[in-house]
Image (cartoon, coloured by chain):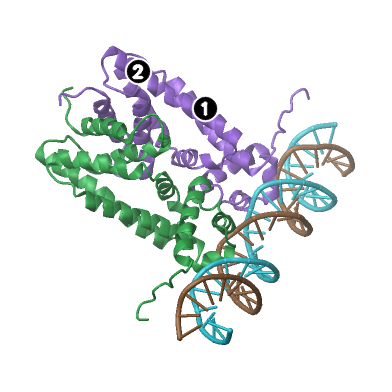
Chain colours: A green, B purple, C brown, D cyan
Amino acid sequence: MAVMARKQGSHSDITGPRVRDAALRLIARHGYAAVSMRQIAAEVGIQAGALYNYTPDKQTLLFDLMQGHMTDLLAALEAADLQGNSLARLEGFTRFHIRFHLPRPDQVFVSYMELRNLTDDNFAAVEALRRAYEDVLENILRDGEAEGVFAVPDPRITTMALIAMLTGISNWYRAGGRLESDKIEAIYWDMVRRAVTASAR
Amino acid sequence: MAVMARKQGSHSDITGPRVRDAALRLIARHGYAAVSMRQIAAEVGIQAGALYNYTPDKQTLLFDLMQGHMTDLLAALEAADLQGNSLARLEGFTRFHIRFHLPRPDQVFVSYMELRNLTDDNFAAVEALRRAYEDVLENILRDGEAEGVFAVPDPRITTMALIAMLTGISNWYRAGGRLESDKIEAIYWDMVRRAVTASAR
DNA sequence: TTTCCAAATGAACAAGCGTTCAGTTAAATG
DNA sequence: CATTTAACTGAACGCTTGTTCATTTGGAAA
């Protein structure tokens, strides 16, 4: 009993994820403020009061979803282990970003739309994670500029521009649509590469 | 009395715009669902009931803001009167988009974040206006492809990518920040141009 | 000065909100 | 079989929501 291990057969390790899944889907669809705890509970098939076995309050539920998404993102980026020269790492980053975000439209939606519904402290925590992710791209751009491969007058702005462009895919992409991930990656990598490398002009 | 002319000195032609201004600012800040009619009324300095002299309901208030923004956008684009070859028109579109959106951060925020809070009919109406705007850019890209100036394998996707990139400026731009509109236009036009024109590679 | 009426008040409404908690349930433990 | 307890119910709490409407207000018109 040294560890607070969950009981075998307990429902909580099943209901917990179901609560988070329902909350994510509903919030992505209708927005944090527009979704009630009763709606989330109904989606799971329990009463509203039972939700409080899994979250201290609604705000923490939102924060956990957003922080979890950013943590997963950073861990996956780490695991992608970008290497090589700056051009190769930029391609790696571009393809990683698309491949990670494409299957997670709800997380993307919530993470970019519900920032203003976080308390100040929670916002600061999520913002720090997001900044860490952006900095990876910014450093690739700075390295490429130093190497003479990229022509990027303002790496910070280019970082924001590229991430906005890539994340915007979620605005139109629908699973099972006319384009596969591979095709999308190819199109966007082409645009990204051209946007940051010097042109003949 | 053939015309329902507003009485001289009537408050309504002053209060009306003030209601819309307050609603826009509050909704941009906190989101449509999180803002109450009482909050909007308090911002204007009237009671909640008086709002219904200026809008039939909360939903219509949101819709009018969003439709108004899209209508203004399309009218301004028309007035910009883009001419010349496809490259010149692309530059014109890029600079127009930045110049129109930079001074209107609240409208941009609301127009891109509150789509899901519109009723189906209202959504369809706003979406049609947005599509009309996107089509202007898409046609420029198609023309440029035909002229052999652009290398754009999928004009529709490139349209979405460029608009996401340009509109993303609102995510980081703050009036009075380190960069003027001219500088931002130059940086983004450079990226847009390179992203769509063929590279030596 | 009296009349008029657009504009705004302020109270009321039914409904829904996040959250709490005493009580019930049912499965695992001893 | 008896006991324990995590999981859940269902009712209740104080408060806020969008909207309505009879009544009051104050400045322009006559």
Q: Residue drawn at (21%, 34%), measured in percent from left and top?
A: A196
In which quadrant is the N terminus of chain B drawn?
A: top right
Q: Which residue is mark 2?
A: B142
The kind of residue on which mark 1 rests is Ala
* Mark 1 / mark 2, whichever is N-terminal: 1
Relative to the observer, which residue lies in front, B37 or C23? C23
Relative to the observer, which residue lies in front, B105 or D11? D11
Residue B16 pos. (x, y %): 63, 39
Relative to the observer, which residue lies in front, B89 or A66? A66
Q: Chain of mark 1?
A: B
| Element type where label 1 sits in the image | helix
Q: Which residue is mark 1?
A: B128
Q: Chain of mark 2?
A: B
Q: Answer above or below: position of B66 versus D22.
A: above
**Would residue B77 be visible to someone looking at this image?**
yes
Query: Residue B155's quadrant in the figure?
Result: top left
The kind of residue on which mark 2 rests is Arg
> Of all residues shown, which one is farthest toward the left?
A147
Same subunit, tags 1 and 2: yes
